[in-house]
Amino acid sequence: MPYGIRKYKGCYKVFNKKTKKIFSKCTTKDLANKQIRLLRAIEYNKNFIPRSTNRTRKNRSRKNI
């Protein structure tokens, strides 16, 4: 899918050029480019697994031991 970036009221929006679906309304140019790279990776790479920065960890407090 072709994705595009438009400047909109001092911010940038990311959208699909064919369906006109908006993925973000007000973001910086760097974050908009990162989002387009992510959307393309999800679409074209079937083995792509996004790494999240907020990974869940098991609760290892002393109370549970």
Image (cartoon, grey):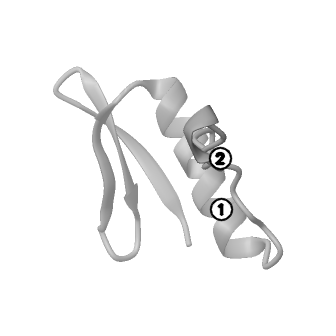
- Measure the C-alpha gap from mark 1 to mark 2: 29 Å
User: Which residue of the protein is positioned furthest toward the left in this rendering?
Assistant: 9
Name the residue type under label 2. Arg
- The quadrant of the rendering that contains the C terminus is top right
Residue at image position (60%, 46%) is: 64
Q: Which mark is residue 57?
A: 2
- The quadrant of the rendering that contains the N terminus is bottom right
Task: Find residue 55 and report its horizontal and vertical position in percent.
Answer: 63, 46
Residue neighbourhood size for the residue with mark 1, other residues' Cα within 10 Å, grouped as few (<14), some (14–19), many (≥20): few
Q: Name the one closer to the observer, 48 or 1.
A: 48
Residue at image position (30%, 67%) is: 21
Task: Find residue 37 and report its horizontal and vertical position in percent.
Answer: 65, 49
User: Which residue of the protein is positioned furthest toward the top in this rendering?
Assistant: 10
Left or right side of 5 for 56: right
Secondary structure at numbered mark 2: loop
Name the residue type under label 1. Arg
Q: In which quarter of the image is residue 44?
A: bottom right
Task: Find residue 60 and report its horizontal and vertical position in percent.
Answer: 66, 41
Is there CB contact under 8 Å for labels 1 and 2?
no
Give the residue number, with chain letter if any, for mark 1.
40
Q: Residue 5 carries which label?
A: none
Q: How many marks?
A: 2
